Amino acid sequence: MAEAVVGMQSRVVPRRLELGAVLMTLLLGLVGFVVLAPLAMMLIASFQLSPPGRTPVYGLDGWTKVLTDPSIASAFWNSISLSVVREAIALVVGVMLAWLIARTDLPGKSAFEFVFWIAFFLPPLPVALGWILLLDGKVGLLNQWIAMLPFGVESFFNIYSFWGIIWVHLCTSFGVKVLLLAPAFRNLDASMEEASRSCGASTLGTLFRVVVPLMAPAILVSTVLGLIRSLEAFEIELLLGVPAGIYVYSTKMRDLIQFEPPQYAPSSALGVAFLGILLLLVWLQRRYLGQRVFRTISGRGFSTRETQLGSWRWPTFSMVLVLALLITLIPVVFLVMGTFMRAFGYFNIPNPWTMQHWQRVLGDAQLIRAFQNTLIVGFGSAAIGVVLYGVIAYVVVRTRFYARGLLDLLSWLPWAIPGVLMGLALLWTVFKVPGLLPLYGSTALLVIALVIKSMPLGVQLTKSVLLQLSEELEEASRIAGGSWLTTYRRVVLPLLAPTLVTVAVVGFMSAARDISTIVLLGSNQSRTLSLLALDFAYGGQMERGTVVAVLTVAMVVVAAFLARLLGGKISISTN
Amino acid sequence: MRIKAIVVSLALLLVLAACAKPAPTASQPVAGASADTPASAWAQIVEAAKREGQVNVLGQGGEPVSEALAESFRKAYPDIQLEYTGLAGAQMVTKVLNERAAGLYTVDIVIHGTTSMINGLLPEGALDPIAPALVGPENDPTKWRGGAYEFADDAGKYALLFLAGMKIPLIYNPNMVTPGEITSYHDLLDPKWKGKIAMLDPRVAGAGLASATFFYTTPELGREYMQNLFSRQDVTITKDDRQLTDWVARGQYPIGLASNDFTALDMRSRGVPVESLPAEAVKEGTYMTAAWGSIGLINKGPHPNAARVYLNWLLSKSGQEGAAQAAGYPSRRLDTSKTGLRESVIPRPDVEYRDLSKERYILQQEEIVRYMRALIPD
Amino acid sequence: MSSEPTVLELREAVKHFGRVTAVDHVSFTVQKGEVLTLLGPSGCGKTTTLRMVAGFERADDGDIEIDGRLVSSPRRRVHVPPEKRGLGMVFQSYAIWPHMTVFENVAYPLTLRRLNKAEVKQRVEQTLDLVGLGTLGDRPSTLLSGGQQQRVALARALVYSPDILLLDEPLSNLDAKLRNLMRIELKRLQERVSVTVLFVTHDQIEAMSLSTRLAVMNRGKIEQLGTPKDVYETPQTPFVEDFLGRVVRFQGTIVDLSWKGMLVELDSVGARLQIDSEDETLALGQRVLVAIRPEDLEVLRPGEKRGTNTLSWTVEKVLYLGSECEVLLRSGDAAFTLVVPRARATDVQQSLDLYFPADLLRVWPADEAGPTGSDPNLSETEPTPVTATP
């Protein structure tokens, strides 16, 4: 039955209201709220000259200060230069490492991958503490040994410096890069490399001219992720930078709040300014990646023949071994050593070693409670986070939801607010928005805060893996008769499972380490290990803080190990 | 898959279970409170306090302090649950003021330095006069310094001071500085100390700002001295007391100003080379401080009777001794033991000290900070 | 026309992507048991049409009916989701799930349909046998070769006996040899199972050898729909002519068969061509059609020798078109037009030697889908050289 075709324009047929669209809009609303409310608070606070809790007085002083104060400009500059240098080095080395692990016959590469996996999860603070013992300008062991050498110089290394900060960060950055890039490298079709080799290109030449360009999307994603992460970094800059007078934007924000009276307005204005930069970076990333498909996993066969390293095999092995040890074992060993020192960092006092710190900490009744709280808060935020980030990532990547671009953008925004202000912003949110007050002081609020905090990383990780999955894998399930839910459950989730495990562990560790976000939100009952450590530091008991740091590292290693057992990696599952 | 679902549901249940704390129930103070309350009236108050069942105290962070202010009370009054939260001054003010602005009244008592009290809580009407709550057998002003309670606020009603210690002028490295070398603050202007002095940030509330206030308000020193010190001597600033102590002990900066020398004392006991210069050694003397030892009674606190019981306990001899030990400064209550406290921090009974915890000085802080920020730009 | 019932019907299907009309009022029907191919260059809308039938693309206008049931009609606000259409589909990338074994992959649709374990096992094994993978049930799917993956995909699509099988360029990811093999197998499979097939490809030879009917598509429209013979012999538009005309075909007889392949003696030319074909259904003495794309031919320089599979052609006409030239070649009764790049134009003299690579020659039975044997292809018709379309 032929319809009259003449004069027919293609009509826009109005869509029925579908359950899917409704649910996704609800999701958009939820995410929008939890992300935009604190941001809005921050924005308002940047104009509010009177301290919070008092009758508001508005003005532009905060912004004037941000825009004219040279120390703030130099803090910004430091942030940028630290990030760029760190990312550049991490990228070059990371690409090499990922390639070595994924595509060559490097001996022990699965062991190395595990080491870098651990490095990924190691909290930077304990690592920094360990390195302080070695690299402190005056009393660092390494410096002392170097000074003893015939041509030795005093204070060769100084960890309280620009390069000190970069070094400690690199210890974790390498792990991040390897984790993100190795799976993508692995999924490349070996025949592309072989084509290059057969044209006469050397191994390295092939790496740079063929492999790297093909990996460009994955590399770009991890670079932008890394840049953003390093821009908002805080703990290390606080520990190593502030004593040397090197401020970055996040430590500057904290600094401002600690003045008498606390300068909330410029601090918030600084945060809002950073938001601008963050948006720029996100825009850049989307522009260059855009909707580009970089499907490398389609369920199609691919060969992964290894590149032979030849005579370079063992030298490379040694170099990678040294690097792997440098970023994991060495700082941890020295940190542990440090916990037995009577006074941290003092080797030359009488009886420098003692067990007392361990005894005090382990015998402390608060420790058990702190552990419990850490577990509750950590698991809670990890579990909720995984579900939420997975759904957001799926909606953004796979559906044709009209506002998925907006949802994507929203998921980035929490990175603009460092923990320092996030806690405050959430506090103001809970107080100002009607109906939220009952949350105050509850563990639930802590969990929500931490879920928000980890959202950018969690969503990005999940997205990057989802992007590598061909849509046809899901379509094959649909056409075979599977509903959307069945497809998600039996095809997407199992393939995503390793990444989701990783995201869960990342969320857990991030929650366990967090201080600044939750310090204002929690009550005495909900004190976690990190807050306990802070308490020790307050009381001038740095040594006990290091014991807690070691306990945290132990927790990390266990968690990372478990995650690995559960198949964690940042890739799809290929049994 | 199923395991995951179970884990997820468990986690969610945990989270839900940990949700909102029950709202505090209002309670009325038992009538008939006055300075010489007969035992039966006090017993009624204690009963009422036990019925309230809880008291919320905000104080300084750190284990020694919570030990002294919380643990001991719990042992004395096991029926009254004490919620102690340790926060830094600025955070404490933020928490209290924000809660109140939202109509939440969860805190009964605040124990903090006077800056937070006077500059933070008092202007917002968050403090009630404390005298009506000072009932109970321990209430005896005659046992205190000067025969009366001292208050930080000029009105003499709101911020009760209970600690008084002498601030050490400076800490030094005994291998690099001989004690007799420094007899006056002006000695620090000697070119040989250029680049060798570190100081706790004087622009930040705490020992740093207190020292700056001392310089500012001491006639022999004043702005001129500060100008000379900071512009000529290359003073390095730090915000962390432990770091300051480390710098001094390792010889990086052999002289440390404005130190909270408890860290130094602690380190010294472990064999680390750092010493404190006693106040008598220096011509200009030093100032008195209450450190974190001032009490405020929060307006509309949820457990007024329990608050009274706590106050009564805190002001007792044992309560004060515990606090003094934790702070390292003596209590203003005269019959408390001073064993274990350093000689150098105990105020001489015959000397007139300026108490920088008082409102007059606190109010000057903003001006001083501004001056310091100009002297030491960020 | 076949008297079989219609299993698929599209009526004026339309799909826009932004301002581009990918599918422009496409209509066709598919009868039970036939193979309908959508043939065309990339971007012509064939894949989009297929995906509209599958339900992955929502039509903007037009109706789609499967087995008389309306599955898509924007006007009537009908859109049956893919999982409810009862179709089978093989994707271009095969989409074999890496986290499952071969058995699990193929069993998946059956488990969705709640069959009991024994029945599932039986049907999966049956289907695996059918595609020639009987022994590979337990193998993890990541350890399969390309050809094996394709077979698994086929098995998965067929195991629940769908009414229609959709094939999205299933052979284009295989190497030439495998492609040949699979093409033959597909044909056999289709006949054996007698499933209706909607096939999408850009390869004319595939289309011609496999289809019952084919639809040549260009820019979203069907230019011509008919049997391969009709379309090939009587192209109705210049595009169809051009698109299909680019095939060199001969009729011949198999004169030798060995493990290496076969030797076919061409009718009109009288020469012999060695062909690497593993088609075991072809017998000695059978009449066959041999085809190759002109771009696969090698123009030999004067004096260059290659041995077997070299045919000499007389140059009848040369048409210079700037960067290239069209040469009308003839040998005996066979004639065709070859496009030669200008750089090689100097090699074109009186005669031209062409080398026919043995592995790129296709061969299939002369009485099958495809122009029937009585037609000595091109000797009667003057092939029209490509000129600017009016």
Image (tube, helix red, strand yellow):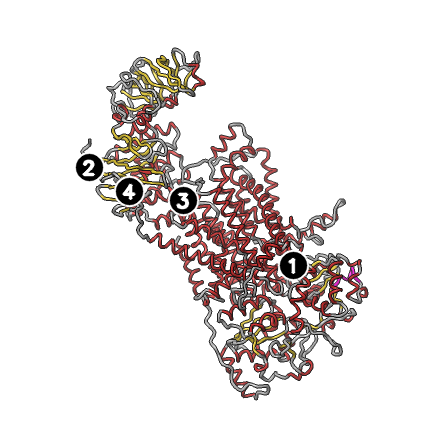
Lower sequence index among marks 3 and 2? 2
The residue type indicated by label 1 comes to Phe
Nearest to the observer: residue A96 or residue C189: A96
Kindly identify which residue carries mark 2: C5
Point 51% across, 84% down: residue: B30
Could you say which disc has been placed on residue A340 in the image? 1
Closest to the camera, between mark 3 and mark 4, is: 4
Magenta extent: B171-177
Report whether mark 1 lies on the same chain as mark 2.
no
Subunit under mark 4: C
Q: Residues within 10 Å of mark 3 (few under 14, many from 20)?
A: many
Point 35% across, 52% down: residue: A20
Report whether mark 4 lies on the same chain as mark 2.
yes
Is C340 one of the magenta-colored residues?
A: no
Closest to the camera, between mark 1 and mark 2, is: 2
- Label 4 SS: strand
The residue type indicated by label 3 comes to His
For the residues labelled 3 and 4, say whether their Cβ atoms are less than 8 Å apart.
Answer: no
| Above or below for B347 versus B224 | below
Q: Residues within 10 Å of mark 1 (few under 14, many from 20)?
A: many
The residue type indicated by label 4 comes to Asp
Q: Position of residue B98 (x, y in %)?
A: 52, 68
Is B174 one of the magenta-colored residues?
A: yes
Kindly identify which residue carries mark 4: C61
A133 sits left or right of C86 in the view: right
The residue type indicated by label 2 comes to Pro
Report whether mark 3 lies on the same chain as mark 2.
yes
Subunit under mark 3: C
Name the dominant secondary structure of the magenta segment.
loop
- Label 3 SS: loop
Kindly identify which residue carries mark 3: C99
Visible residue check, residue C259: no
